[in-house]
Amino acid sequence: MLFPLVSLLASLPISVLSFAPGPGQIPSRNGVLGGVDLKPIRVVAENSTQFPTTPGKLRVTENSGYCETTKDVYQASGYGDLATNKSIWFWYFDARTNASTAPLTLWFNGGPGSSSMIGLFQEHGPCRITNDTTGVTLNPYSWNNNSNMLYIDQPVGVGFSHGTTTVGTSEEAAADIWKFLQIFLKDSRFSHLAANHLALWTESYGGHYGPTFASHFLAQNTAIREGSVSGIKLNLKTLAIGNGLTDPISHYPGYISYANSNPYGPLVNVSTIAAANASWNAPDGCRAQIRACNQGGNNSVCSAAQDWCNNNILGTLVGDHDVYYVPSDENDTYPPDFTLYLSSIGDKIGAEVEFQVGPDDVYNNFAATGDWMRSKLPYLEHIVDSGIRVLIYNGDADFIVNYQGVEIMLARMKTRFSTEFNKQVFQNYTVSGHQAGVYKNAGTFSYVRIFAAGHEVPAYQNVAAGLDVGQAAFQFFTQTMANQSLFST
């Protein structure tokens, strides 16, 4: 997800925590939402505490008894040590049914620099944090009902991961994750999963991560096949992205159109929208800066574009609404914060450092390279054309990566299915007869817009439609993981 706001929640009493906003996604820099420090310097920060690492191997705590309490369902948490100074945290859960043959699903939150424990505790994990933030409840719509789930904190420095913080681009992050998966799948506890279908699910800045990681996996598979790289081929079959920031030239006009007209009413007044339009269209405005970035611009050009566009467009258009769920006022307390609970069980699940839902160093590294503004649409188009099943999904109540910007991107895509996709009209997407959204299919590519859902789609319910929390998301997850196009039930 887009990077969490720096929070003091862990130091506050429960009575205060229950009224404080949960982990968000995106920080402010110099008063700019998603901004950049005035003189961005790429950080190389190392945790001062040394740990007994085992480079190239896992260190695992098995069956801790936390989160997944379904009888006889295996779980493991711990670290994959990339090097003596780089350790990636993971939490793995067997599928509740047919674990030996079920696919392996990787989950990544975004940021850049957000912990994937957000997805685990707030969205689709075996347990979900309670609204009072003090405990968890078993999740009947957990995605491990029918898939083995692997939640990964990355890059190094995020969540419980620790070590030297150097990653500042999506491509560098992809290289570390490929290395981690090689370690994970060589371990005797998980080696049987290498032959199972592999899926990559992600959200928000995952619109960058997902296409980049998937493309890197396929390139490494080719290199292994050709003998230039040694390793385990990754049996990638699925890529899915929720509310994903992939193609900035599409997303920024989407902010303007969504602020003016969306299912929940205008977000700001007409003069603010007019000013944002002028900022987009000016000769040296946001559109021109994004183009300059993606036409060979260096880090400074792309970083400056991020700061300028977020100052003049993204940050001005949300008004007094929550950027992740616009029907609420700013600083909505839902989804509830899980950091105090997670910190309280850290030593029981094998964690070695204080939990950081979104550390500054990682975000600053990405801001310094301008990775945010570098389009990953070519990667996404390549993945679609490679035969991988791809799902794009969006909650219609999210502003920060809203559906209008995503749908502008879909209209711009050039894949073997794009002509057919763009000819399609939206169909109603129902779940057990209840209206959940609208969708399109073309070949192995699908898109669904979920009504009444914010940035973290599986965290929401549609009370008016009679749908429970996570019910609609579980249906599109299940259909996609079965290698099916979307369909109503």
Image: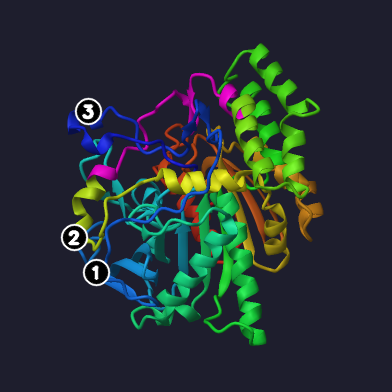
Rendering quarter of residue 89:
bottom left
Q: Quick check: 421 left or right of 120?
A: right
What is the C-alpha distance between the residues marked 2 and 1?
8 Å
Give the total number of marks visible in the rendering.
3
Is residue 351 within the magenta segment?
no
Rendering quarter of residue 328: top left
Around disc 1, counting alpha carbons within 10 Å, would you say few (fewer than 14), some (14 to 19), or many (20 or more)?
Answer: some
Q: Which residues are magenta?
A: 314-340
Q: Amino acid at mark 1?
A: Thr
Which of the marked residues, 2 or 1, is nearer the chain's N terminus?
1
SS type, badge 3: helix
Where does label 2 land, which residue?
A: 348
Q: Residue 469: x, y in percent?
A: 39, 43
Residue at image position (55%, 24%) is 318
Query: CB of mark 2 within 8 Å of CB of mark 1?
Result: yes
- Between 410 and 24, the residue placed more toward the observer is 24
- Which residue has dot 1 on it? 61
Q: Secondary structure at mark 2?
A: helix
Residue 326 in the magenta stretch? The answer is: yes
Q: Which mark is residue 201?
A: none
Where disc 1 sits, the SS reads: strand
* Badge 2 or badge 3: first in the primary sequence: 3
Residue 84: image location, x then y, percent: 36, 70
The residues bearing labels 2 and 3 have C-alpha atoms spaced at a distance of 26 Å
Q: Note whether 192 is above or below 379 in the view shown.
A: below
Q: Amino acid at mark 2?
A: Lys
User: Mark 3 and mark 1 in contact (Cβ < 8 Å)?
Assistant: no
Q: Which mark is residue 16?
A: 3
On screen, residue 47 versus residue 432, left or right, reads left
Kindly tell me whether residue 432 is visible in this rendering: no
